[in-house]
Image: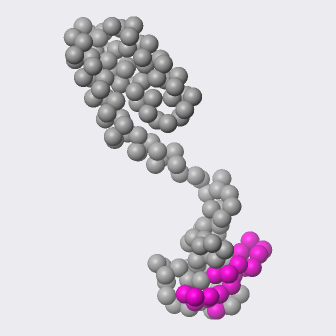
Amino acid sequence: MLWFWGLTAGIALGLEFATTTFYFGLFAVGAAGGLATAAVGAPVVAQVLVSAGITLFGIIVIRPLALKRFARVPIGTRTGVDALVGAEALTLMNVTLHEGQVKLKGETWSARLDPDLTFDPIEPNVRVAISRIDGATALIFPLD
């Protein structure tokens, strides 16, 4: 049975490299567990249970953590409106929950207060930060 688990792990690893879904890699780790169990002389039922247990644990626990970790995009590599979140801007007029304008990276943007962060209107010529972009409107909050 050693050859079976080794072949299964190799094929699953190859499929993971081809698809990058984090499923086949965990299946390969489970097959490696079955290989280790077979190497110590355990019965086939134990090999299958160890392989299945490791694979299921990986899919239920490890895969969600890995997806969160690899889904993060560093601020320096963000593009488009995602790159504007966290950027500083300067208010050009009073900014309220309903209207306003800011100068953001050399461009004039419509803006409004982010209701999750502040309700107090912001005067002109105040430094603010962008919390998110809603369509073509920057939602802002004061830096001070």
44 left or right of 75?
Answer: left
8 left or right of 83?
Answer: left
15 left or right of 31?
Answer: right
In the rendered image, the residue lying farthest to the right is 106
Q: Please state the horizontal and vertical placement of residue 79, each as a whole percent of the image.
A: 68, 57
Q: Residue 92's quadrant in the figure?
A: bottom right
Q: Residue 26's quadrant in the figure?
A: top left
Name the foreground residue: 136 vs 112.
136
> Is residue 121 highlighted in magenta?
no
Residue 130 appears in view: no
Quadrant of image for the N terminus: top left
Q: Please state the horizontal and vertical placement of residue 31, each as a whole percent of the image.
A: 37, 20
Name the foreground residue: 124 vs 34.
34
* Image coloring type: one colour
Which residue appears at 51% of the width and 45% of the height?
A: 70
Which residue appears at 30% of the width and 9% of the height?
A: 39
Residue 105 appears in view: yes
Q: Magenta segment, which residues?
A: 94-111
Question: How many marks overall?
Answer: 0
17 left or right of 102?
Answer: left
Quadrant of image for the C terminus: bottom right
Q: Please state the horizontal and vertical placement of residue 90, each as a whole percent of the image.
A: 69, 81
Q: Please state the horizontal and vertical placement of residue 62, each as a whole percent of the image.
A: 38, 39
Which residue appears at 32% of the width and 15% of the height?
A: 36
Name the foreground residue: 55 vs 105.
55
Task: From this view, report whether residue 144 is shown above or below residue 77.
Answer: below
Which residue appears at 35% of the width and 8% of the height?
A: 2
Task: From this view, report whether residue 31 is shown above or below residue 124.
Answer: above
> Is residue 102 highlighted in magenta?
yes
